[in-house]
Image (tube, rainbow, N blue to C red):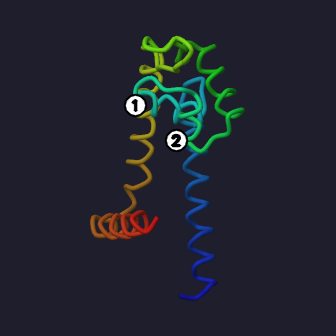
Amino acid sequence: MKEDSIFHLIRTVEQFNDKSIIEFTKSFKGDIGIAQILVLNVLSENGAMKQANLAQKLGYSKGGITHITTKLIQKGYAERKYDEEDRRIILLTITDEGRKILQEAEQTGKELRQKMYAVLSQEEVESLTTITEKMLHAL
């Protein structure tokens, strides 16, 4: 494969990702950003977690996750709780308000994806799915 072709593909994927994030940010009426939504999603899927584990799972620095979680706590979307078995351990957990804002973000994302992928034929969707799965497995 030619280097120019790969570079063009990589650049196109980057532009698509950037544009998707911009469109989501413009569409989402909530008062949090993508990083906070990702944290809430992990908490929703995995339950209470230590901030260090959360940072590792998302690839954030300890300082970065502290900044993100502090904002979530201030807004009432997450809270710190002591581990019942070891009170020295502090866990972060999603609140009911956090679940609500996460659900709103998921709905906005769903609507945006439907709009973005509506330009593809069924055959193109199947091809893109196959290609994306192949690349994902390679990672």
User: Label 1 is placed on what type of residue?
Assistant: Asn
Q: Which mark is residue 70?
A: none
Q: Circle 2 is placed at which residue position?
A: 57
Residue 8 on image: x %, y %:
61, 75
Q: Residue at x 57, y 30 (%)?
A: 36
In this rendered view, identify the residue nearer to me: 37 or 116.
37
Crowd around label 2: few <14 · some 14–19 · many ≥20 (10 Å): few
Q: Circle 1 is placed at which residue position?
A: 46
Q: Residue at x 41, y 27 (%)?
A: 44
Tag 2, which secondary structure? helix
Do the residues under discs 1 and 2 have CB atoms within 8 angstroms? yes
Decide: is 52 above or below 86.
below
Crowd around label 1: few <14 · some 14–19 · many ≥20 (10 Å): few
User: Label 2 is placed on what type of residue?
Assistant: Lys
Q: Residue at x 34, y 64 (%)?
A: 129
In this rendered view, identify the residue nearer to me: 84 or 62.
84
Residue 41 on image: x %, y %:
45, 32
Q: Is residue 100 left or right of residue 17?
A: left
Q: Residue furthest right?
A: 63
Decide: is 42 above or below 7.
above
